[in-house]
Amino acid sequence: MNSLENFLEIVIHTLPVFLMVGVGYLIRQLKVITDESEKSIVRLVVNVLYPCFILTRIPGNQSLQQLSVVFSALTAGFVLTLSGLLVSRMVGGAFKIQKTDGLNTFSVSTALQNYGFIPIPLITALFPDVADQTLGVLFVHNLGLELAMWTVCIVLLSGTAKGALKRLINGPTIAIIAGLLLNFTDFHHWIPSFAQKAAHDLGNCTIPISLLLVGATLGSVISSHKIQISPKVIVGSLLVRFAIMPLAFIAVADILTGSQELQRVLVIEAAMPAAIFPIVLAKHYGGKPNVAVQVCLATSLVSLVLTPAWLLLGLRLLGLAY
């Protein structure tokens, strides 16, 4: 298969993801999802569906029965997020984005890629034979990322460390820790089959509902914000998100040869656009939401082409089959 055929194959795998996001955007514009229902769906996903999804992918996961893999995934998520913050800060300074212009918001929103709801279906599509094992490693990686997000990123936005660690106590974090304990102790074998089936069925709702939610949130953001275009914010975020950080993720994946699952996770994360959640963080912690909106929209639009391109390049460089 030549490079063009490989690229088109990966595009085909990514299209359903972007299509579901687009449907979410459309139904938000048609008010099928309203402001109030959006908040309820977020609570449903974060507190019920996503934890169930995690708890059916970590217990019994052979890839996570080695402490070295757990430690590497956790550390990679934390260190790469801090590296993204540092790189974003440097790029923002080079582009002369001042603190009054939202340099801190630029740094946070550019450093945080879409680390969950889009990577999950991509992993399922690209690696169907090892999807569950790879997803388990993804969740541990994301725990490291969230540790950096709820501490360093929040301090950068708000200027205070008050309550940072408390915010780490949430449904997905508890589910990841509980899942790892069940995995290491083999206690998951004691869970009744009917409970496992219920959790599995609820967890399987996570991907489509979450992708609709991503699109709906984008629609809400675009409708409620008067977007002021700043070329230096847009160009700077694209430089970080689709040039510098993908190389950093792939370089780390090349070093961490002990787990192909972790390598797959890092390649997927390398290709992701900026996350939507920093817009919410900027609203609540004294940042500049308009800056976060620009970063999110610019990288999301470009990701239609560059995400498949980086996926193909990363998988080829590391010799990972899909």
Image (tube, rainbow, N blue to C red):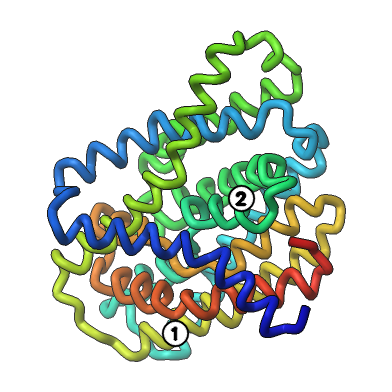
Q: Say above or below: 97 vs 267.
A: below
Choose the circle earlier in sequence order: 2 or 1.
2
Q: Quadrant of the N terminus?
A: bottom right
- At x 29%, y 70%, the residue is 293
Q: Position of residue 93 (x, y in %)?
A: 44, 85
Q: Would you name the residue on which mark 1 appears?
A: 236
Q: Would you name the residue on which mark 2 appears?
A: 124
| Mark 2 residue element | helix
Amino acid type, mark 1? Gly
What separation in Å lies between label 2 and label 1 (alpha carbons)? Answer: 31 Å
- At x 14%, y 48%, the residue is 34
Q: Is residue 244 left or right of residue 292?
A: right
Q: Residues within 10 Å of mark 1 (few under 14, many from 20)?
A: many
Q: Residues within 10 Å of mark 2 (few under 14, many from 20)?
A: some
Query: In which quarter of the view is residue 233 placed?
Result: bottom left
Q: Are marks 2 and 1 in contact (CB under 8 Å)?
A: no
